[in-house]
Amino acid sequence: MRVFHVPWADGTKELRIPADRITAELKFTDLPPVKDPAAALVRAMDNPIGRPPLCELVKPGDRVALLTGDRVTDRMLGSRDGLGHVILDYLNRTGVADANVTLVFAPGMHPHGSIDEKLGPALIGRVGRCVRHQPECDEDLVLKGYTSHGTPVWINRHVAEADVIVGFGEVSPASHGGWTGGGKIILPGVAGRATIEQNHRWLMTPMTILGLADANPMRLDMEEAADLAGLAFKIDVLVDSQERMVGIYSGDFRLEHRAALPKAREIWMTRMEPTDICVCHPGERRERALGSSFSMSFTAANLATKPDGIIVMCLSAVDGWGKGPDLPYNAERTGRDVLKMRSEDIARDLVYARGNIRTGSLTFVVRRTLETKRVYLVCDGIELAEAAEYGFAATYRSFDEALGRALEEKGDAATISVSLPRGIAWRCLPWREG
C-alpha cells in the first residue's frame, strides 16, 4: 500500500491505495529559479519576442497603462524589490515619468479585496494613478470593436485612453482559455461584463479545454479582443512551488505566451495514460466546502481518466456548500442550486444570460462531467441525499469503502491515477499539446 495524507477539516486524512495499481501521479515540477529576476526582466524587455524593445515602443511623455491581474502577488510585482519597480525604472529611462503611468488591477469578474494587498502600497504610491477595474461600470467602458466570433469588446476607458498598453502576468493552467497569461490581461482582465459573459459561453464547446491554447476558441476570442484593445507589449512569468520566478517572457502577447508554454507544460503537466480510476483532492483551502473552488482539480481528474473511468473525489466539506461573493447565480439561485440542475438547463441559462455567467460556466463543466462519468464523493459534510441531487454516483464517509467499490467495478486490472495537490499545485493536469 502507498499511504497519502491530505488536508481534512482541521487535520489530515489517510488515503491508502494499492501501490501496484498506481500508474500515474499528477505532480508539480519545480524548475531552477531565475538567479536575478530584475536583470532577467530588463533583458526580456530589451530582447522581446516578436516586438521591438519596449524602449522603442514608448517615447517621452507617453501615457502608459500598466496592467496586472489577480494571479500576480505583491511579492512578485509590488513589493519594494518587486518587478513593478523594474518596469517603472525602465520606463523612466525612456522618458516616461511615473506620473504618466496608470497602474490597472485587471481581475475580470473575479472577486477581489483590497488592491493594496495585491499591488502593494509602494508601487501604488509611485504611479500617477491606480485603477481597480470594475467590469459592471458601463460608464467607464469604451467599445473597441467586435471579434470575428461576435464578441463586442468593451474595455476600461483608462486603458483605452493610454498611448501604450503594457501587461504583466503569469502563465498557468486555467479553465477559461486553457492558460492564464498572454491576451487574457485584456479579456477578461479589463473587459466589460457583457464582453466577458459573451466570451465565457465558449466554455460549452468541446475544444475549450484546460491546458489547450492554439485550438481553444475561447482563447482565440480573447486574443482578438487584445488586438482590438491595442495591447502593445506583454510580460509573463513562470513560477515554482514557492512562487519564485523560473522564466520571464516578453513581447508580442501571442508569441511570448506560446514561447512560455513548453516550460509551463513541464511545470504543470504530467505525462500519463488515462486510468480507470482517479483519486483526487482539491488541495488545502479548497477542501472544506463543496463549490466552484474544486472545479479545476475536478476537471483535471476527468482528463486523467478513461471515458468510462471513475473519479473518487475526496474532500471533507465540513463547511457544507461554499459561501462567497463569487457563488451567487442570480436573485433566486445560488451556485448550490445550480449544481442540482441538468447541464442542458444550465446551458440554456448561459445562452439567455440568466444568472452569473462565470458561476454558470464553471458549474456547467462540473455538472456535465457528473452526468457523463461516475464520480464517487468521499466527504463528511454533505448529506447523502443532497450529494445525489448534485449528480454524484455514490457518497461515502469512508475512503476505503469508496475505493474498494471503484476497484470492484473496474476489475482486477484497474489502473489508478492520483491527484493530491499541495500549495499552488491544485492546477496540475495530465499532459496535452496544442
Image (tube, rainbow, N blue to C red):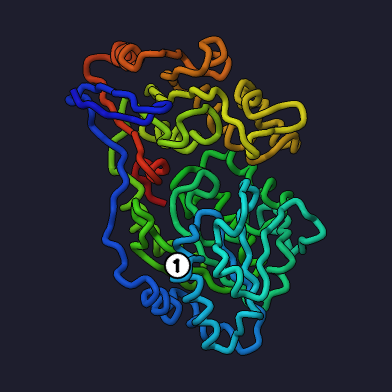
Q: Is residue 17 left or right of residue 106?
A: left
Neighbour tally class for label 1: few under 14, some 14-19, many 20 plus, Cα within 10 Å: many
Would you say residue 168 is visible in this rendering? yes
Q: Residue at x 68, y 33 (%)?
A: 328
Q: Is residue 194 above or below residue 248?
A: above
Camera-side residue of 232 and 15: 15
State the residue at coordinates (34%, 30%): 6
Callout 1 secondary element: helix
Along the viewing direction, whichever of 20 and 385 lies nearer the viewer: 385
**Residue 13 picture quarter:** top left
**Residue 110 at x, y = what percent?**
61, 47
Position of 183 with respect to 161 (left or right) is: left
On the question of residue 184 being in view, the answer is: no
Q: Which percent across, then down, holds residue 19?
A: 19, 26
Residue sitting at 73 percent across and 59 percent down? Answer: 154
Question: Residue 63: horizontal and vertical position, in percent?
Answer: 67, 79
Q: Quadrant of residue 303?
A: top left
| Residue type at tag 1 | Glu
Q: Which residue is mark 1?
A: 256
Q: Residue at x 28, y 26 (%)?
A: 416
Name the spot of residue 51 as percent of width and height, x first: 49, 77
Reply above or below: 402 against 54. above
Above-or-below relation of 213 to 142: above
Q: Is residue 100 left or right of residue 291?
A: right
Q: Quadrant of the N terminus?
A: top left
